[in-house]
Image (tube, grey):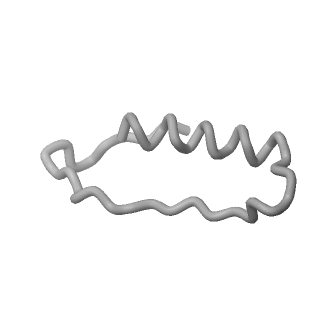
Amino acid sequence: GRLVRVLEAFTPAPRPVHLLWRQDLRPLPKLTEFIAHILLRLDTI
């Protein structure tokens, strides 16, 4: 149950990621937390 990097020397080019959600509705706490988590993770990649 562990991920292992196979190609250490290979780093793929960055790709844009888009998060879309309806802003006209009140966001659910789990959506807000998910977005915060993704933004944190994308900052470290």
Tell me where residue 38 appears, x and y as whole percent: 56, 44
Residue at position x 62%, y 38% from top?
36
Q: How many labels does the image show?
A: 0
For residue 29, side relative to residue 8 (left or right): right
Residue at position x 55%, y 39% from top?
1
Which residue, as the protein is rendered here, is positioned at the far left? Answer: 9
Which residue, as the protein is rendered here, is positioned at the far front? Answer: 24
For residue 19, side relative to residue 28 (left or right): left
For residue 18, side relative to residue 23 (left or right): left
Image quadrant occupied by the C terminus: top left
Using the image as rendered, state which of residue 21 and residue 34 is in the foreground. 21
Using the image as rendered, state which of residue 44 and residue 18 is in the foreground. 18
Tell me where residue 42 appears, x and y as whole percent: 44, 43
Quadrant of the rendered image containing residue 32: top right
Residue at position x 50%, y 62% from top?
18
Quadrant of the rendered image containing residue 37: top right
Residue at position x 75%, y 65% from top?
22
Using the image as rendered, state which of residue 22 and residue 41 is in the foreground. 22
Tell me where residue 23 appears, x and y as whole percent: 74, 60
